[in-house]
Amino acid sequence: MKKLLVAAGASVSLFSYAGSELNSEEQHAVEHVLVTVPFRRVEAETALPITVLREDELQNLAGATLGETLASQPGLASASFGPAVGQPVIRGQQGPRVAVLQNSLLVGDASNASADHGVNVEPLLADSIEVLRGPSTLLYGGGAIGGVVNIIDGRIPTQYVDRETKLEFRHGSVNDEGVGVFRFDGGSESVMFHVDGLSQTTGLMAIPGAAERFLDNHEDDHEDDHEDDHEDDHEDDHEDDHEDDHRVSVHETPDVGYIVNSDGEQQALTLGASWLFDEGVVGMAFNQSRREYGIPEGGHASHDTEYADSHDEGDVRIKMEQKRADFRLSRTTTGSVIEAVDWQASYSDYQHRELEGHAVGTEFNNTLWQNRLQLSRRPTGNWHGVLGLQQSHSDFSAQGEERFIPPSNTAQWGLFWVENTHSQHTTLEVGFRADNTVITPDSSAVGTQKFTPISGAASLLWHFPRDYHVGVAVNHSERAPVVEELFSNVEPLALNTPYIVHAATQSIEIGNPLLSLERSNNLDVSFSWDKAKTQGYLSVYYNQLSDYIYLQATGQSQDETPIYAYQQTNALFYGIELDATYRVRSGLTWRVWGDYSKGRQDTNDLPRMPPMRLATELSGHYKAWRFDISGTHAWAHRRIAEHETPTDQWTRMDAAVHYSIDHTATDAVLFFRVNNITDAEIRHSVSFLKDSAPEPGRSLEIGIRFLIN
């Protein structure tokens, strides 16, 4: 905390110096029109808690993974599984409770099947990323109890733009990273084309000290004290009483200074085209991506050999490939009822192999068809409406050593309806969604499972004088269990054969075909403001879940591997988020943000919850120069679940400088960034590998970006 205060003080001390040199012309960002909400509004017109990363922000924040790209925003975190995997965490929830979309349709990978599977998207190619916190089930299905992440990349052009080519090259020192990105958009007023591509290679990730850590022998004392302290919910007292019990001693292992088997590479290519006409657009796009990355030691229980250039037997490598085709038809109509029609569809073929040396250990396959039809109703008075139909069909299989889930297909249909009305001082929105989910396993041990989730929501936004807003959003949402929760190890259980270990979690997971719908009741209250010199929001949420699906320790083991079973209970998530920006003077802004989230299962803490964080950032521009200086402090995470290890507090400092070169036909931006300036050891409480794979150490990143008209 002292380090954070010093950073804040240093930021304030720069105000007078930087402010005296800045340009008097303030640059105002164009308001972003939201794609992920039904009525295409700007952020100030909705009571939903939304985070938007626009193109200019993404150029500075885009990391190797989606989770890393979002982690510096309130309420968001990254569940890393080594440097190549970073699944997004929204308000402490992840996995199947967070829907990751690409242009409003599911990505179609296997990231929800395991913590070591990466999300197959490229943040560096995105135009923007929109994140809806809290239950976002009305438009995108009942699984999105935690929230929705929508990556918008413009692969199907929807409007005419002048010919434009973008190129970017960057190099990072922390893992000898080399990245090349290109994009072209252009054509005529009736036919537009889009091409983009990415190539990236990374070496071993550098870290401060050793990768693996061991706790001092205080675990038994911690468990006893932790049990007693559940009766007292004062975080500070608990932290003070046990600070000495959780100090971490680093065990000197051969992998000091880097993370074993953490190198990787990826390539992606997208081709898109569309026909623009007076009433709308019709287009399609094709994408192919390949990725290979290593799983650090500790990620798989049976793999304990040292890294070698030849990737000795025991080093686990993941090779994934996905082919995806997207289609879109959007048009306005002259009918008396329907104002606009928007149809989107995609087909994806995903394959992912886990290699031990040259041998294939497990192969995952997922083919996914999706259709989404959205009809906008012509306004009646002040009421606007959207009616939609969503359909998907997925064939998923896993073959090999980790075949703990039988092959299955999942068919889903969803119908949603949202209405909106507004007056001078209020905006009201109500909605309803009904889904039908049928999951059919290819197994004689268990039969087809059918679910009918029903969801509803209402939000009210009050507009007060002087640009103040108060919003209240209430949601009831229902989530159907996914394949892993229902069918993991059901065949070995029925046949009385040995269970199959889920190596990523180093445990045996047993599904439960009797699971019912998971239900969520969420309340979100927000206060926001948009003044000439200050903008920001404060949000408080309370999410009560019944029949919450979780893994319960059975107390049994197989060959010393613990056995867990999927069960249901009550759970509670609550927290607070703050994001405020102050314009010190023309060209100079100071941002402060922070978050706190808590998750409980009955009287026990839920595992892998994010720590409380507070951050400050100073940003400015002067003529062709722009700079950013930021500091983030995370408190120690001591209130933990059973069998979970604590994490220490950490403070991270980052800085970046950009220099723009303007030319008649070509613009260029040189950028230099230093991440984790103090080379702090950072272990994220949301990561499965926090004890064996810390976050990157100090990194120097340099690059150049071209815009050719």
Image: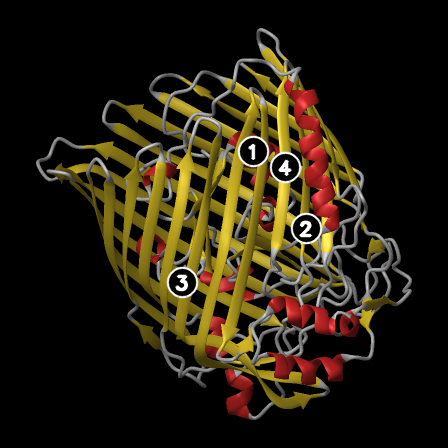
For image coordinates 70% across by 37% down, the residue present is: 9
* Residue depicted at 27% across the width and 47% down the height: 373
Residue 168 percent location from the top left of the image: 65, 27
Residue 329 is at least partly visible in this image: yes
Q: Where is residue 139 in the image (x, y as percent from the top left)?
A: 32, 52
Q: Is residue 409 left or right of residue 682?
A: left
> Is residue 119 something that shows in the picture?
no
How crowded pointer 1 is (Cα within 10 Å; few <14, some 14-19, many 20+) is rated as few
The numbered dot on residue 57 is 1
- In the image, residue 59 sits, relative to residue 679, either above or below, namely above
Q: Residue 294's image quarter?
A: bottom right
Q: Disc 3 versus disc 2: distance between alpha carbons?
A: 32 Å
Write down the residue under mark 4. Answer: 617
Q: Earlier in the sequence, mark 4 or mark 3?
A: 3
Which residue type does callout 2 highlight?
His
Q: Distance between the residues labelled 4 and 3?
A: 34 Å
The mark closer to the camera, 2 or 1, is 2
Q: Is residue 424 above or below residue 402?
A: above
Badge 3 is on which residue? 143
Residue at image position (67%, 78%) is: 643
Which one is closest to the eye, mark 1 or mark 3? 1
